[in-house]
Amino acid sequence: MQVFKFGGASVKDANGIKNITNIIQKYPSTNLLIVISAMGKITNKLEELTWAHVKGSESAQEIFEEIKAFHFNILNELFKDHNNPIFDEVANTFVEIEWLLEDEASDGAAYLYDQIVSIGELVSTKIVAAYLNQMGTFTVWTDARNYIKTDNNYREANVIWDKTEQEVQKHLPSFLDKGVVVTQGFIGATSENFTSTLGRDGSDYSAAIFCACLNAESMTIWKDVPGVLNADPKWFDETEKIEELSYHDAIELTYYGANVIHPKTIKPIQNKGITLYVKSFLNPDEPGTAITNTKTPLPVASFIFKVNQVLISIFPKDFSFIIEENLSQIFNILHKNKVKVNTMLNSAISFSVSVDNDEEKIKQLIVDLSETFKVKYNAGLELVTIRYYNQQTIDRVIINKNVLLEVKSRHTCQIVMKDKTPNP
Ligand code: ASP
Ligand code: MG
């Protein structure tokens, strides 16, 4: 069997849904599981709605109306018959948010976030499944929360693998025999049956979980790019598409921030030796990229850029050496503030980390670190990671930059840098 994952960009409007329907209809309709994200930028809107509700802001209702109108406009374009039960189904799904919004936001913000934001996936999958049925493809809609079982670490829930595998194997195969099965990415359920989410962009990971539990033959992520490129076209004029990529390189690239695939996706796929294709939903007949157990390293150097970095340097207050005890304290503080380290370097008297400049988090982090350490930081930086670097590739990225930190391993070089300020 095969698993397809369609992200928000592929279902951002009625034409998008028509397009993915055409793609799906090229494949045999049994033994095909489709995992879908929320439409377009709806997850961002739902986040806004959650924060407005948590703050008790009046704008919550307005944002909610906007979200509903967006979906009903698409429904009106796709279904000429307004008696189609999908209209009621979508309306009923939104009623669940209405109930939450009527109460004061007394529960934890992360819990509320998951209950509200998950609606995006529930609605998008209902619409796509109804449309596929209307277009003659027998489709079964199923609720991912029945399968993906997680802990209650809301917004970044951890999958409980044995329970998940059990639920998937018990129920899904009989649906897959009947027709195309459509389910949600990104969402799961706790043991108390509350909705949880797997972290932003987690739908790729959901698809990989289903693949691993079903021993799928392959998984395909359908994107608006032709496949995995050696750099983001946003930063580089000349990019190359990679035909075949090893799991290992894919893990490294996504870990360092290549946002073509969610970093957690590869491991479950690799463990089962399942091929992962990344293909274009705009040119579905093109081969895209295949991620496999090939031993061949990348044919070209790959570049991953992260902007808006802060380089934080941490020193013992008495300027003594950095020792293991300091490091363990520093990592505890980073962990407590949920700050992910993008690169790090230690010297005798300091330890430096480059992290995303998420203002609220970083402010608190610096307060916490400053209790024990002397802290210096520098914001507005870029981090570039080069996989399979050589001097030429390094020279290429540091033109007109001041390098603040450079870390090299055998295949990977990371550089934290800043634009050279022009002479006055
Ligand atoms: N809709 C969720 C998000 O935008 C999950 C996903 O797209 O993978 O983060
Ligand atoms: Mg998305």
Image: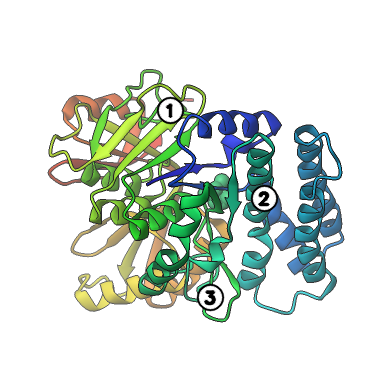
- In x, y percent, where is residue 150? 47, 72
Q: Earlier in the sequence, mark 2 or mark 3?
A: 2
According to the image, label 2 marks what residue?
126
Q: How is the image coloured?
A: rainbow
> Mark 1: which amino acid?
Trp
Circle 2 SS class: helix
> Mark 2: which amino acid?
Lys
- In x, y percent, where is residue 347? 20, 60
According to the image, label 1 marks what residue?
235
Q: Earlier in the sequence, mark 1 or mark 2?
A: 2
Relative to 414, does residue 152 appear above or below in the rendering?
A: below
Mark 2: few/some/many CA within 10 Å (<14, 14-19, 20+): many
Which residue is at 24% across, 79% downward?
325
Mark 1 Cβ and ligand 2 under 8 Å apart: no
Q: Badges 2 and 3: C-beta atoms under 8 Å apart?
A: no
Frontmost of labels 2 and 3 is 2
